[in-house]
Image (spheres, rainbow, N blue to C red):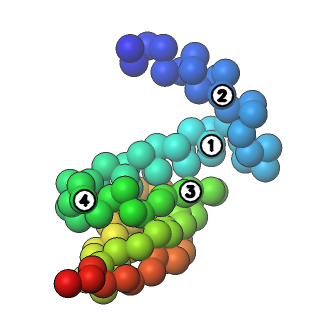
Amino acid sequence: MLRYLPLLLLLLLPGCRTNESPEQQVNDLEITASVKSKLASDVGLSTVPNIAVNSTNGIVTLSGQVNTTAQRAQAESIAKATPHVVRVVDNIQITPKAQ
């Protein structure tokens, strides 16, 4: 399956952002996947679907909703600690659960 990944990327990348080189686009895909993976393992699977991760030129944008400021801070620190991340834009909203 992994041997088909480069072929899949070559087919999909031309339709992606044109302001980035193919190498940078692959790096951004890797950054996004890494941040999402770390969010799932550290923050918890119930919160991850509420957080969107986008990476462009190494700048990671986090958006969505979480229940606590601690979850927001943890998501931001996870993104900042990810290799090749230049900057993190945190647009996560805090919306406490109704009790």
Tell me if residue 41 comes above or below residue 30 in the rendering.
below
Q: Earlier in the sequence, mark 4 or mark 1?
A: 1
| Viewer-side label of 2, 4 | 4
Give the CA separation, mark 1 to mark 2. Answer: 11 Å
Give the CA separation, mark 1 to mark 3. Answer: 9 Å
Residue 39 sits in which quadrant? bottom left
Give the CA separation, mark 4 to mark 1. Answer: 28 Å
Reading the image, the residue beneath label 2 is 12
Q: Amino acid at mark 2?
A: Leu
Mark 2 lies on a secondary structure that is helix
Query: Percent position (x, y) of residue 55?
Result: 56, 56
**Pointers 2 and 4 in contact (C-beta within 8 Å):** no
Q: Nearer the viewer, residue 62 or 28?
A: 62
Query: Percent position (x, y) of residue 31?
Result: 46, 51
Reading the image, the residue beneath label 3 is 55
Give the CA separation, mark 2 to mark 3. Answer: 16 Å
Q: Residues within 10 Å of mark 1 (few under 14, many from 20)?
A: many
